[in-house]
Image (cartoon, rainbow, N blue to C red):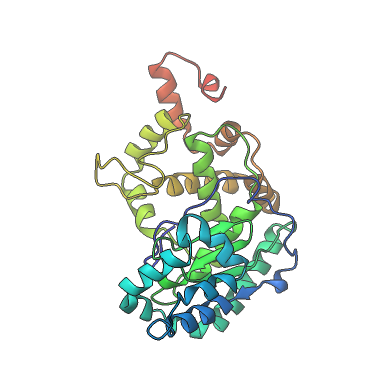
């Protein structure tokens, strides 16, 4: 999940407890942008030199649900945050005023939420929290909502596209075995519908590489898609070639796009993409890898349909 914001890859916890939430508003106009944690952070930041105790204790204690959702594995605790802020004061200062133009982005996100409501009437809309962490995450989706690591922002370019991607994760209920294909459909689906509703692409570099190396990558993916190992496709690479991280987003997008283009009822297609019961059958319906699957099966002296069992 990259953008011009120089985000680190956002870590998504794959859990139906997080995705498919039902305790959020179903009205796109109720979208919540919570920025109070930014104000609290800078109040603590400005007390660092004269306070006898850790000023970020108050930041943590007064924190929104977003701070609580960002604590485990990211902020850790007030002492950990204090240590990083002292070491990287100048880096934090770069984002002091980054949220000044957030009101215009809020309007844009409400429009994106409304677009999703058109495509998927059952959509739920989580709150969006802008919090400060330790420069180790651009953001995440959590049971609390969408959480953005504000210290990572250089500007607000790409924020709406990023939020659109994360928003789709809350709607998804993708079943099936935990294999590469499933995770690529999850991320590719979020990219595809996120782009459909926002008009923004957040993974342009890996997508360009994918298109330039389509034949080679489709052959490799066909042989790998039933495996649980996601290296070289999601989040990390083995450095065996010059590929970027997260090519699985591109591959999932291509499969999703092929499926979507084949369906006459596009709203029903979106519902199907968000609620995939059998990733292998979905792949078959998309037809995207048919040529490669037929070739792969022929090399194993097996029939085409046997691949999907």
Tell me the quarter of the image containing the C terminus: top right
User: What residue is drawn where x is 52% and y is 71%?
Assistant: 131
The answer to which quarter of the image holds residue 26 is: bottom right
The answer to which quarter of the image holds residue 152 is: bottom left
**Above or below for 277 versus 141:** above
Q: Nearer the viewer, residue 30 or 107?
A: 30
User: What residue is drawn where x is 40% and y is 28%?
Assistant: 223
- Place of residue 23 in the rendered image (x, y in percent of width and height, measured from the top left): 74, 58
Q: Does residue 177 appear in this view? A: yes
Is residue 145 shown left or right of residue 301?
A: right
Q: Residue furthest front?
A: 52
The answer to which quarter of the image holds residue 167 is: bottom right
User: What residue is drawn where x is 36% and y is 48%?
Assistant: 210
Q: Nearer the viewer, residue 166 or 197?
A: 166
Q: Nearer the viewer, residue 3 or 271?
A: 3
- Place of residue 9 in the rendered image (x, y in percent of width and height, measured from the top left): 41, 56
Tell me the quarter of the image containing the N terminus: bottom left
User: What residue is drawn where x is 45% and y is 49%?
Assistant: 249
């Amino acid at each position: 999940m990259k953008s011009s914001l120089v985000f680190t890859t956002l870590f998504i916890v794959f859990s139906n407890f997080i995705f498919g939430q039902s305790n959020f508003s179903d009205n796109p106009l109720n979208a919540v942008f919570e920025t109070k944690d930014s104000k609290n952070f800078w109040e603590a930041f400005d007390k660092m030199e004269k306070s006898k105790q850790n000023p970020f204790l108050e930041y943590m204690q007064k924190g929104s649900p977003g701070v609580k959702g960002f604590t485990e594995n990211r902020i850790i605790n007030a002492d950990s945050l204090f240590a990083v802020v002292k070491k990287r004061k100048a880096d934090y200062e770069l984002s002091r005023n980054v949220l000044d133009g957030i009101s215009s982005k809020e309007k844009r996100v409400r429009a994106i939420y409304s677009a999703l409501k058109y495509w998927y009437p059952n959509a739920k809309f989580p709150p969006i929290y802008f919090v400060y962490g330790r420069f180790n995450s651009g953001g995440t989706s959590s049971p609390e909502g969408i959480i953005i690591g504000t210290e990572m922002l250089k500007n607000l370019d790409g924020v709406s596209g990023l939020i659109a991607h994360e928003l789709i994760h809350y709607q998804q209920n993708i079943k099936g075995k935990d294999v590469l294909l499933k995770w690529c459909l999850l991320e590719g689906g979020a990219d595809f519908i996120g782009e459909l509703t926002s008009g923004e692409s957040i993974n342009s570099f890996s997508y360009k590489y994918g298109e330039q190396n389509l034949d080679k990558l489709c052959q490799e993916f066909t042989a790998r898609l039933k495996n649980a190992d996601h290296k070289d496709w999601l989040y990390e690479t083995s450095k065996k070639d010059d590929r970027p991280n997260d090519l699985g987003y591109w591959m999932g997008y291509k499969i999703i796009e092929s499926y979507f283009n084949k369906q006459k009822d596009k709203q029903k297609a979106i519902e199907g993409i968000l609620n995939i019961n059998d990733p292998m059958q979905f792949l078959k319906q998309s037809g995207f890898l048919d040529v490669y699957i037929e070739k792969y099966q022929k090399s194993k002296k097996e029939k085409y349909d046997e691949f999907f069992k």
